[in-house]
Amino acid sequence: MKTPLVAINMKTYPESTGEAGLKLAALCEEVFEETEKSIAIAPQQCDLSLYANTFGLPVFAQHVDNVKQGSTTGRITPEAIKAIGCAGTLINHSEFRISPEDVKILVSRCRELGLTTIVCTKDAEESQAYAMFKPDFIAVEPPELIGGDISVTTANPEVVSDSVKLVKQVASEVKVLCGAGVKNGKDVSKAIELGADGVLLASGVVKAKDQKAVLLDLVSDI
Ligand code: G3P
């Protein structure tokens, strides 16, 4: 996946539900086409198939379950998201933590299927530990800054630069994203300055009054 990457986790906000979510994804696609910048979206789980078949930009699941295909009611397998055309998945998001063993197995299952993995972490040490599983991306997001007004790049720039340093020590090919409170192009530029390969964000775009203006600003300097 091309970097710098701006990955948008649509979570389950009212603004990403139903028609509103489709409108937001259409704006992401517009900006993706107009600017040719690397933008990916992670819509609500119930919308994955629709989005993967409608929009011409990479669609990620917000989570997949480490369960076998078959008698596992209500779960979403890596095989299922691959079959409907998703590009990849978030794993271990702060709002959906799973065990280290499950992270390891899911990264490996997704790799075999050709799915791009973004493993979320809470700090630099966890970034290094999970980099050893060789996901495509580590996304470091201090939980206390998620959904807040101050970007991780301002509130805790060290967690970004330390994550980059520690990840590269164990797996130079693993790329690093940062997230939590990212709102604008300056935050994205700062992330790149700190050594990151892009950002993972949600509320800054999803809850914005003018979502397209925010999207254009986010990719303006990359
Ligand atoms: O996955 C993105 C995320 O947890 C950050 O959320 O709202 O702080 O951009 P937000």
Image (spheres, rainbow, N blue to C red):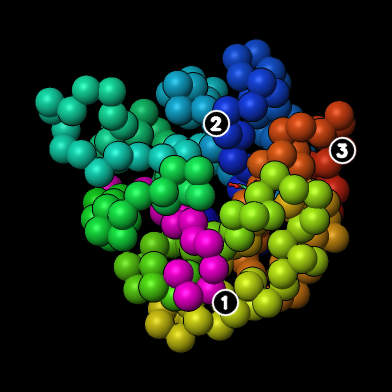
132 over 73 or under it: above or below: below
Residue 74 image offset from top left, x and y in percent: 28, 23
Residue visible at 35% across and 40% down in the picture: 64
Q: Which mark is residue 164?
A: 1
The local crowd at label 1, few if under 14, some if 14 to 19, many if 20 or more residues have their Cα within 10 Å, is many
Residue 138 image offset from top left, x and y in percent: 49, 63
Residue visible at 71% across and 39% down in the picture: 203
The residue to which callout 2 is attached is 43
Closer to the camera, 91 or 114? Answer: 91
Quadrant for residue 85, please give it: top left
Dot 2: element: loop
Residue visible at 51% across and 49% down in the picture: 94
Q: Which residues are magenta?
A: 112-126
Q: Are marks 1 and 3 in contact (CB under 8 Å)?
A: no
Disc 2 to disc 1, C-alpha distance? 27 Å
Tell me which amino acid carries mark 3: Ala
Tell me which amino acid carries mark 2: Pro
Residue found at the far bottom of this picture:
169
170 over 81 or under it: above or below: below
Disc 1 to disc 3, C-alpha distance? 29 Å
| Res. 105 in view | yes
Mark 2 within 8 Å of ligand 1, using the beta carbon? no
Residue visible at 76% across and 32% down in the picture: 207
Mark 1 or mark 3, earlier in chain: 1
Residue 164 image offset from top left, x and y in percent: 57, 77
The residue to which callout 3 is attached is 213
